Image (cartoon, helix red, strand yellow):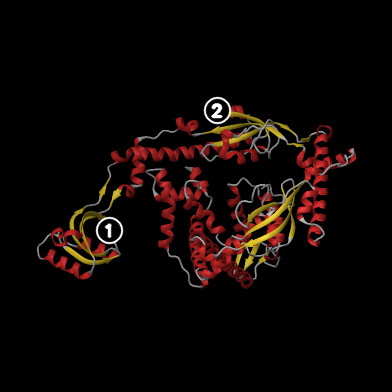
Amino acid sequence: MLTAMRDGTHSKVIKYVLFGFLMMAMLGMVLMDVGGFFRSGGVGSTVVAKAGKDKIGMTEFDNIVRRTLSRQGISVQDAYRFGLTDQILKTQIASSMLARAAYDMGFYVGDAEVAKQINAMIEPLLKQQPGASRKDMLQRFLQAQVIGEHEFIATLRRGIMQSLLQSTIQAAALTPSPQEAAALYPYNNESRAIESIILTDGSIKDVENAPDDILLALYDAAKGLRYSIPETRTFTIATMGESSVRDSIAISDEDLKKEYDANIDSYTSPERRAVQQAVMKDEESARKVLEAVQGGKSLKEASGKDFQGEQTYERSGLAEDIAAAVFEAAPGAAVGPFKSPLGWSVMVAAKTLPSEVKPFEKVKGDIRKGLLQTRLADQMFNTANAIDDRLAGGEALEDIAKDMNLKLEKIGPVRQDGSTPDKHDAMKAFEKDSDYILKSAFEINEGESAPVMELKDGRYATVRVDAITPASFRPFEDVKEELRKQWETDQKAAANRTRGQKLQQELAAGTKTLSAAAGEFGLSVQTINVKRSGEPPKGLSAETIPALFSAIEGETVMAPVPGGVLIARIKTVTLPDPAKAPEKEMKEISDTLTKNAKEELMGVYMQALERKSAVKINRHLLDSMYGPESGNPG
């Protein structure tokens, strides 16, 4: 359960709520210049950034950074070094500007809409834990995400406002005309017939042997990429699952009754009303049916084929005006007519079903399941903290495992990517958490244990490094022959390109024909049809196509192909008739144009907001918080 709430893997809504708002503004921001955006300016000693009237404080931003990075297993210093912190800040600024713009334009999201979104988010979690109340589940969710209720609601409200504003702006994007799609279709589907020969690198002979000093220089330049033997580590993983703590949990009938009483609303059905209904096409017909029922006929007799039968409704399950009429009517009274998307309804209020409470004994089993899951999650969380404390106190992992019923598994020697020296996957048993575990194992010293981490299947784990084999390199003598062959291959490719360039110049000048050149090399001229889109013909590659489509009809070009160069003359150019284009393909082109127009419009709007807001960044403060000199352990 904690995994579901912390990681959001079981609910798309949770992912949307937690991270969607942070990423929402990026659509327009990607078109902005990062270097220009992150310009410095005086914004105050504890303010990270300022956009118009809004400021992003140091503490607020640090909380956002750590919350965003916590589930990725990335330290704040690594995030800063790789530019991830700048991206988070960029997104926060964009979010702030959009929220301010939405507020200034009068966009407002009421409490009812916020509550609706929260209920939609909590619903999947309630299904996983029957018997839990909505309020309790929300509190656990907020605790797991380390976010306060007020901050969460404010973020949710702001995100909905941003979404509304973004939709409004993008709705103004012009729909591409059929003429635009028709103009793009021939370009996308252009085809060409070429006459060509291929000069292979392997046909070059008499390449000089490389002396050892050149090979040694190549070795020194490439050994870090091609001849390194990565560091390997052997480590022990200790895991704790529900079975480790289940026997320590006892749930009494008194506990169940307290849970039942505390959440009695969850087991209470409100007053309901059995209602007969008939739906007619127009108001006049509905009024005639109403009069007939009031005159003594049953609704079924009066409405005939329009009779919909009898259903039971809670007051909240009906529109407000209908609910008021139905629940205040005397038994057997007819009410209506009411207009709905289906037509005009007449209803007869039948019997009233009073509010009722499910007996404790009937729901006792479900409550036990829910309470057990809650206590298991809490006990595992507390036990994980206790393991951390004992490890910090210097206790041996084996002693802790024995006391706390942990499972120990030896892994390695293993490389940082999870592979063994003989290229097997050492982390197959921990596939979903492989990156997370390996990162922990390669960040600590021999003999140390990593902090306890939560795995995606709900278990907890810690890693102790048992042995480290440092990185090294394959000896020069072992790879000398490999280097020599690579040298020869590179020399042949360079000589072949020079030969191809000379031939292309001769063909372009008219001093030689393609047929004559083919004869000199013992080749024959091949005619090939190529398309701008789709897979390249056999023998060509994706790198070949741009050169062939950059030339005009009758021109000779040289283009790279696998293992050589292509010398080709553009024989004919064919542009298809857009009037004969498949409807599906034209729609795809139109959809792409629409999407691009929306993104461009959003980008222009975000650039205008940036200029209006006079965005300023406190780069000095960011460096002091996360830079190399910050002393921040991450």
What residue is at 83 percent from the left and 35 percent from the top?
480
- Residue 29, can we see it? yes
Displayed quadrant of residue 618: bottom right
Displayed quadrant of residue 281: bottom left
Q: Is residue 318 above or below residue 476?
A: below
**Residue 460 placement, left or right of 269:** right
Among numbered discs 2 and 1, the one appearing first in the sequence: 1
**Residue that label 1 marks:** 315
Percent position of residue 384, x then y: 55, 37
Q: Nearer the viewer, residue 378 or 317?
A: 317
- Labels 2, 1: front one: 1
Q: SS of the residue at dot 2?
A: helix
What residue is at 26 percent from the left and 55 percent from the top?
313
Q: Residues within 10 Å of mark 2 (few under 14, many from 20)?
A: few
What residue is at 66 percent from the left and 38 percent from the top?
417
Percent position of residue 64, x then y: 59, 55
Q: Which mark is residue 403?
A: 2
**Residue 290 placement, left or right of 101:** left
Percent position of residue 553, x then y: 69, 63
Q: SS of the residue at dot 1?
A: helix
Percent position of residue 240, x then y: 53, 33
- Residue 93, can we see it? no
